[in-house]
């Protein structure tokens, strides 16, 4: 079977690697998003996955429109397209072009957490488990019939990027098993319409910490959003990106948003406890430890964040 992978995320690396190593299927290349302006200099650059694929001498296509994508599919004569974090809804007429259509590797047990950010929403919501579903794409958003699912436990203090790394390896294995099922003409099962939840993409503003929240909620927000789009707070006019924190169980209660410095340790009060900041990045500067940040402070008493 000839296959293409459509993705714009490094989570597709294990799947692409598995397809290249397969002696049962022909990997036809990667479909990914066009290069775009990024960074402070707004230079036109390929996404991280495309950069890696180029270094591995993998064939890459970057269609800029649905017409471009249609032309690619017709010329490639592919049997199946596997999407994984591609970030685009595919029109129905394009879904029907490959012999076996399109399948998607989604990082939740559908129908829970349909959308662009299932892993982040699972952690933010305090879920104890996550999962993977491989399903047939249809015109809806993550609504197609499923081939395989697998549930996995979310480890304590596991961040979304760490969980995604684990899920991407398991997802590659499930995708390869699904391709075998499709080769055997196995019919996927319709999703149930109960317990549906949505997982839309997060904005930068969603990462602002509210120190009036419970400490477990703050910890979950950090774990869910620290990698992307980032979590942050304001110290006066200075924006602080929080790169490492933990709940401090040994500290006496501090008023929410109040900062207490003890030696080279920085503590902030929350609704029902205290958070220790371990690493942070002040706006315009490099990441540093709490101790390094404290040593640069002119004032250490009466500080408030919010």
Image (spheres, grey):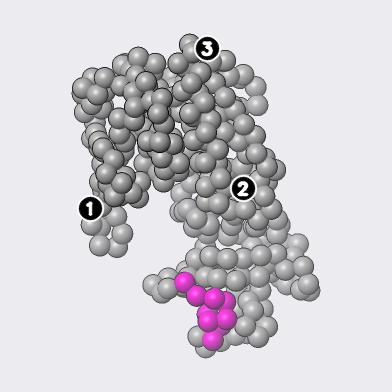
Q: CA distance from mark 3 to mark 1?
A: 43 Å
**Prevailing SS of the magenta stretch:** helix
Assign the N terminus to one quadrant of the image. Answer: top left
Task: Specify the quadrant of the image occupied by residue 30.
Answer: top left
Figure disc tally: 3
Residue bearing mark 3: 187
Check disc 2 and report the residue beneath it: 124
Q: Is residue 302 above or below residue 126?
A: below
Q: Quadrant of the C terminus?
A: bottom right
Out of 120 and 217, give the one closest to the viewer: 120
How far across and down, in percent of the image, does residue 257 sit? 64, 69
Label 3, label 2: how many angstroms apart (C-alpha)? 34 Å
Q: Is 185 above or below relative to 105?
A: above
Q: Which residue position holds label 1?
A: 44
Which contiguous range is marked in magenta?
Answer: 287-295
Q: Is residue 229 above or below residue 243?
A: above
Q: Residues within 10 Å of mark 3 (few under 14, many from 20)?
A: few
Pointers 3 and 1 in contact (C-beta within 8 Å) = no
Q: Secondary structure at mark 1?
A: strand
């Amino acid at each position: 079977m000839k296959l293409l992978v459509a993705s714009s995320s490094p989570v597709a690396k294990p799947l692409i690697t598995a397809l290249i190593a397969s002696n049962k299927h022909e990997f036809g290349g990667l479909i990914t998003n066009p290069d775009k302006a990024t960074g402070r200099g707004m230079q036109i650059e390929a996404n991280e996955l495309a950069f890696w694929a180029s270094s591995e001498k993998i064939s890459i296509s970057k269609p800029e429109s649905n017409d471009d994508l249609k032309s690619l599919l017709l010329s490639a004569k592919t049997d199946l397209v596997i999407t994984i974090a591609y970030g685009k809804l595919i029109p129905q007429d394009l879904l029907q072009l490959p012999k076996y259509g399109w399948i998607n590797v989604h990082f939740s047990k559908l129908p829970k957490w349909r959308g662009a950010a299932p892993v982040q929403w699972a952690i933010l919501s305090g879920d104890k488990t996550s999962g993977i579903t491989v399903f047939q794409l249809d015109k809806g958003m993550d609504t197609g019939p499923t081939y395989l699912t697998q549930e996995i436990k979310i480890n304590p203090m596991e961040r979304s990027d760490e969980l995604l790394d684990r899920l991407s390896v398991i997802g590659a294995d499930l995708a390869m098993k699904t391709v075998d099922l499709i080769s055997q003409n196995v019919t996927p099962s319709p999703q149930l319409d109960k317990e549906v939840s949505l997982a839309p993409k997060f904005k930068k503003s969603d990462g602002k910490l509210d120190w009036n929240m419970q400490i477990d909620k703050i910890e979950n927000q950090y774990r869910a959003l620290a990698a992307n789009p980032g979590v942050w707070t304001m110290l006066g006019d200075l924006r602080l990106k929080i790169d490492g924190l933990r709940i401090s169980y040994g500290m006496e209660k501090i008023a929410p948003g109040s900062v207490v410095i003890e030696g080279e340790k920085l503590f902030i009060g929350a609704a029902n406890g205290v958070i220790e900041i371990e690493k942070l990045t002040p706006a315009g500067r490099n990441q540093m430890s709490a101790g390094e940040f404290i040593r640069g402070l002119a004032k250490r008493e009466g500080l408030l964040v919010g």
